Image (spheres, rainbow, N blue to C red):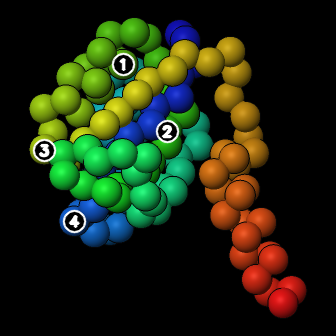
Amino acid sequence: MALYEHIFIVRPDVSPAQMESLLEETKALIEEKGGKTGKIEYWGLRNLSYRINKSRKGHYGLIDIDAEADVINELERLQRLSEDVIRHMTLRVEAHTEEPSAILTKKDDRRGRRERN
């Protein structure tokens, strides 16, 4: 099995609770097809670099996946069909990291600076 990082962006009018359930549904799909999931991160509502489907913001999610290519193909097919998902990208990686992603680390650094002032 190969290692992947799957990042997807969901419409801004979706609630954070719905986004969490979408992450859980994605995890269930991967495990149902015989894959394994590593860390799952919800990055929150973030600004987009450019408009996508008239949206300037989106909910970001990241999932580390250990699965065969057919599982990834099915996941991407379902996300293309979903009306909530506005973008997705799957990258093959050499190894997963246990530490939080750079986005979450950056967010934690900002909180620390605000508390010092």
Q: In the rendered structure, which disc, 3 or 4, sits on the residue that comes first in sequence?
A: 4
Q: Which residue is denoted by mark 3 in the rendering? A: 83
Q: In this view, does 9 lie to the left or right of 1?
A: left
Measure the alpha-carbon separation of dots 2 and 1. Answer: 12 Å
Furthest-front residue in this view: 50
- Against 6, is 111 above or below? below
Location of residue 107 with respect to 3 vertically, above or below: below
Whether residue 79 appears in this view of the structure is yes
Q: Which of 12 and 21 is in front in this view?
A: 12
Disc with the residue nearer the chain's start (1 vs 4): 4
Mark 2 and mark 4 lie on one chain; the one further toward the N terminus is: 4
Closest to the observer, 22 or 13? 13
Q: Name the residue under label 1.
A: 72
Residue 29, given in percent of the width and then of the height, sits at 30, 34
Q: What amino acid is found at the position of numbered circle 1 in the picture?
A: Ile
Rendered residue at 53%/51% (across/down)? 41
Label 4 is placed on what type of residue? Answer: Asp
What's the residue at 54%, 16% (across, down)? 92
Mark found first going from the N terminus, 2 or 3: 2
Label for residue 89?
none
Amino acid at the residue labelled 3: Glu
x and y percentages locating residue 117 in the rendered image: 84, 90
Question: Mark 2 sits on what residue?
Answer: 63
Distance from disc 3 to disc 4, alpha carbons, whole Å, reads 12 Å
Residue at position x 28%, y 24% in the image = 76
- Badge 2 crowding class, 10 Å Cα cut-off, few under 14, some 14 to 19, many 20 or more, is many
Give the residue pinned by disc 4.
Answer: 13
Q: Is residue 19 left or right of residue 107?
A: left
Residue 81 to residue 24: above or below: above
Query: What distance separates the C-alpha of mark 1 from that of mark 4?
Result: 26 Å
